[in-house]
Image (cartoon, grey):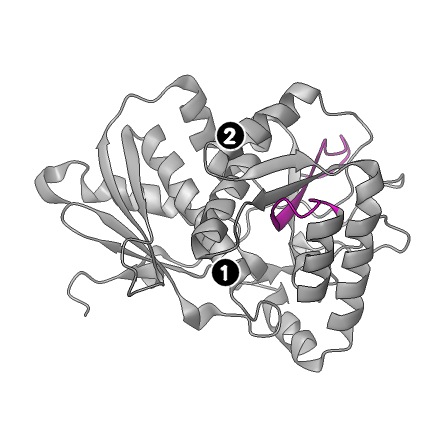
Amino acid sequence: MDRGLPDDYSIETALALACRAPSVHNVQPWRWRICDRSVHLYLDPSRALPSTDPDMRDLVLSCGAVLHHFAVACTSLGFAAVVHRLPNPDEPDHLAAITLVPHRATDQEIALGKAIAKRRTDRRHFSSWPIPPGHLSLFAERAATLGAVVRVVEPEEREHVAAAAREAARLHAADEAYRFELALWSGLHSSPDGIPAHSIPAARAGDELPARVFAGPELTDTAREADHAELLVIATSADDRLSQLRAGEAISAVLLSATTIGLASCLVTEPLEIAAERAKLRMRVLRDTGYPQAFVRVGWAHTSAEPLPPTPRRPLDEVLIPQDAG
């Protein structure tokens, strides 16, 4: 960058950390451009999942998560990120322009930055230990600063989410194109994208909230009792691209905050991928006061659970747009 503030090495370090963000099926649907005075984030439509995510809402959520990860990484390295979202109305895939200014990171900001490398998507069952209310309030506070609402799904509302998950799973199972797409992106070995087999536990009958059925599960789940994770809903007041981007940022804030506390977490989007089910959840969970963008399971991992290895990521040069590109 111009005048070496920050230098290119710092920017690339922050970008490498940012790209640890979660994304639907780990497709990593983002591209970055480093300019003299700013860094730019773009949605990469070539990474689309037509059967899973036909309106690319999950892709925008994923890009929101990587945007927040980048801001957190920069802050922990000593530069505050000033984010201009959707800076070009004529170019909707240009999601953000970011300028950086010197900033002395707080201990809390440094902890969030460290959480990027520690965070994992844990699809296993969690323990029955309760989560202190203060932790749940922290998620809501941090999401609110990003323009989203986060709250616990109440017990009487969870059945509506479970019903939507079952219906989405039924419709997806009957969709040949969806099954083919899922097989392409899950149960993988030695791939820089997609979901590796070592991150997928076998589905278990009788779960309150059915998990997405990925291909090739190889992860052992040692838990035998019922899953007692808290279920959070992340919602926005509108449902345009800006709202989805902000929801993705809030997802990142929740996941990184949970990691700093020591909680395991897993993003859940399948119940919202069927338009009719999403409309029902908007009425039955949010009482028509907002738009559900994602659910997140949070809980304490079992003490017997093996640490999860990191999920592979694409090399940074694959997601960087050359400065001389048109």
Circle 2: element type: helix
CA neighbours of label 2 inside 10 A, class few (<14), some (14 to 19), many (20+): many
Q: Is 112 placed above or below 208 here? A: above
Task: Name which residue type carries label 1.
Answer: Leu
The residue depicted at 66 percent of the width and 80 percent of the height is 177
Q: Amino acid at mark 2?
A: Arg
Residue 153 spot, x, y in % from top left: 74, 38
Q: Residue furthest bottom?
A: 176
Tell me if I can see residue 222 in this picture.
no
Say left or right for 289 vs 247: right
x, y percentage for residue 193?
A: 51, 62
Where does the C terminus fall, quadrant-wise? bottom left
Q: Residue furthest front?
A: 288
The residue identified by callout 2 is 142
The residue wearing badge 1 is 59
Q: Position of residue 176 (x, y in %)?
A: 71, 81
What is the crowding at mark 1: few (fewer than 14 residues within 10 Å), some, or many (at least 20)?
A: many
Q: Nearer the viewer, residue 242 or 114?
A: 242
Q: Earlier in the sequence, mark 2 or mark 1?
A: 1
Q: Does residue 319 appear to the left or right of 304 in the view shown?
A: left
Left or right relative to 27: residue 52: right
Quadrant in the rendering for residue 4: top left
Q: Quadrant of the N terminus?
A: top left
Q: Quadrant of residue 10?
A: top left
Q: Is the residue under label 1 in contact with that under label 2 (CB below 8 Å)?
A: no
Is residue 303 visible from the viewing direction of this image? yes
Range drawn in magenta:
285-306
Above/below status of 158 relative to 114: below
Q: Decide which of 163, 172 is in the foreground and name it.
A: 163
The residue at 25%/56% (across/down) is 33
Query: Magenta includes 296?
Result: yes
